[in-house]
Amino acid sequence: MSKLLMSAAAVSLLMSAPAMAGPQGKMSLDTNQDGTITRAEFMSQAESRFKMMDANNDGKLTEADRAAAQKMHFDKMDANKDGKLSETEIKAARGEKAVKYFEKADANNDKFVTPAEMQNFMMSKKGGKKAG
């Protein structure tokens, strides 16, 4: 179970990379703006991410924590609050590069991603194939 949760956390961190881009495409992880991201800068972001995902603040990531973080993440992207994500919402939240993930997550090809489709996508092997 811990490998599954750590994989979900890693995918979450990687999927959020476009959102972390700052001016001129610099990553906000680069806190001292020197053009490189040190291990300390990266680990600081990972620690912040962990704290955000640890819904009950017990220092552990459980399935319930993962589900709560995923729902919060989904709800933030769902701009019109209709319970599903459109390609436009994905682009607005994560940038053009995230469209390929949107297409993979849209299991029924209806041009929308539901929370269930997002969960299946995130839990599929590396998010690289549709769960079926």
Image (tube, rainbow, N blue to C red):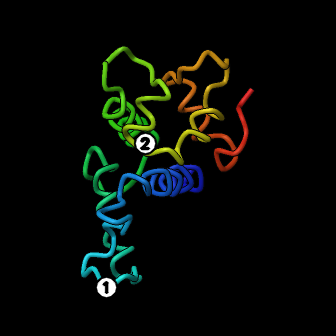
Quadrant of the rendering where the C terminus is positioned: top right
Which badge, 2 or 1, is on the more N-terminal residue? Answer: 1
Quadrant of the rendered image containing residue 21: bottom left
Secondary structure under tag 2 reads helix
Q: Which residue is mark 2?
A: 66
Instruction: Count residues near mark 2 (Cα–Cα under 10 Å), then give few for <14, some for 14-19, many for 20+.
Output: some
Quickly name the residue at label 1.
Answer: 34
**Does 86 sit above or below residue 2?**
above
Q: Amino acid at mark 1?
A: Asp
Identify residue type, mark 2. Answer: Arg
Left or right of residue 22: residue 117: right
The image shows a total of numbered marks equal to 2
Work out how far the residue at label 2 is from the one at label 1, CA to CA, in angstroms. Answer: 33 Å
Labels 2, 1: front one: 1
Please state the horizontal and vertical placement of residue 22, each as a whole percent of the image. 31, 62
Judge from the rendering whether residue 13 lies leftward or rightward of residue 80; answer left or right. right
